[in-house]
């Protein structure tokens, strides 16, 4: 089992920058789940990620549209499944086709629909740190590679996120 990769950001633009660094590693058909409470920063992450893929359209929350598709160097499929009541609705979205298309797929609240997903993905939790010393704009970002394809990329992800790595005590 691969260790989770821990990172900390100190503001919305910092989260976007972290997401952009991760996007440099993106490959066609990648599936990334974004987990975390309302307002944690999932959409902000998608914005930074998309910008680095070359998406120029404004990336907004797809809460009511369920799926937004953007063109870039790699395409971006951005989903938010918060509103979906039933797993069936996720299946109706046609996820296998989206994944087949060759872009990268980001799913906000994706951790709530695991049975509808293929077993290979990067799961990213964004949360407010427990630390009472943490600032209001600090976020703990935990990345968990799931499946052998993503586990094989854990070292590259750790390298790419070194500037934000938590627990190292390094000044940025
Ligand atoms: N370090 C940070 N990273 C991301 N967002 C931050 C950070 N610090 C403060 N924020 C603020 O938190 C909010 C994050 O909003 P965002 O829409 O990205 O959250 P979300 O997780 O997508 O919420 P929802 O569950 O409603 O979709 C923004 O207002 C942003 O400015
Ligand atoms: Mg959102």
Image (cartoon, grey):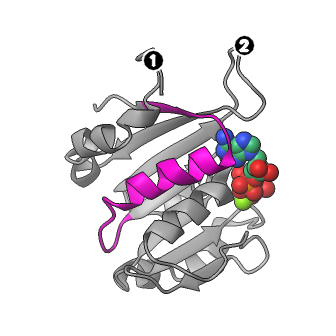
The crowding category of the residue bearing disc 1, from other C-alpha atoms within 10 Å (few below 14, some 14 to 19, many at least 20), is: few
Span of residues in magenta: 6-30
Residue at the farthest front position: 172
Q: Give the labeled residue for mark 2.
A: 133
| Residue 13 is one of the magenta-drawn residues | yes
The quarter in which the N terminus is drawn is top left
User: Is residue 120 depicted above or below 152 in this figure?
Assistant: below
Residue 122 relative to residue 126: left or right: left
Figure check: 126 above or below 110: above
Pointer 1 residue: 167
Q: Residues within 10 Å of mark 2 (few under 14, many from 20)?
A: few
**Please, what secondary structure does the residue beneath circle 1 have?**
loop
Could you give the CA–CA distance between mark 1 and mark 2, rounded to whole angstroms? 14 Å
- Helix, strand or loop status at disc 2: loop
**Residue 128 numbered mark, or none:** none
113 vs 6, nearest the viewer: 6
The quarter of the picture where residue 92 lies is bottom right
Q: Which residue does the image show at 62% across and 83% down from the upper left?
A: 57
Q: Position of residue 77 (x, y in %)?
A: 52, 77
Whether residue 57 can be seen here: yes
Quarter of the rendering containing residue 157: top left
Residue at 44% from the left image edge and 82% from the top image edge: 72
Q: What is the count of numbered marks? A: 2
Tell me where residue 18 appears, x and y as whole percent.
49, 48
């Amino acid at each position: 089992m691969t260790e989770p990769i821990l990172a900390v950001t100190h503001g919305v633009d910092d989260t976007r920058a972290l997401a952009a660094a991760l996007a440099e590693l993106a490959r066609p058909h990648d599936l990334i789940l974004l987990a975390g409470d309302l307002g944690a920063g999932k959409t902000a992450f998608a914005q930074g990620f998309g910008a680095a893929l070359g998406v120029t359209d404004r990336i907004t929350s797809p809460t009511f549209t369920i799926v937004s598709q953007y063109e870039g160097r790699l395409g971006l499929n951005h989903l938010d499944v918060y509103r979906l009541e039933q797993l069936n609705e996720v299946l109706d979205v046609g996820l296998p086709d989206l994944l087949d298309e060759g872009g990268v797929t980001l799913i906000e609240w994706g951790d709530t629909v695991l049975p509808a997903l293929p077993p290979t993905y990067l799961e990213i939790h964004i949360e407010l740190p427990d630390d009472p010393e943490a600032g209001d704009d600090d976020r703990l970002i935990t990345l968990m590679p799931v499946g052998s394809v993503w586990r094989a990329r854990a070292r590259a992800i750790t390298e790419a996120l070194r500037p934000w790595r938590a627990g190292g005590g390094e000044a940025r």
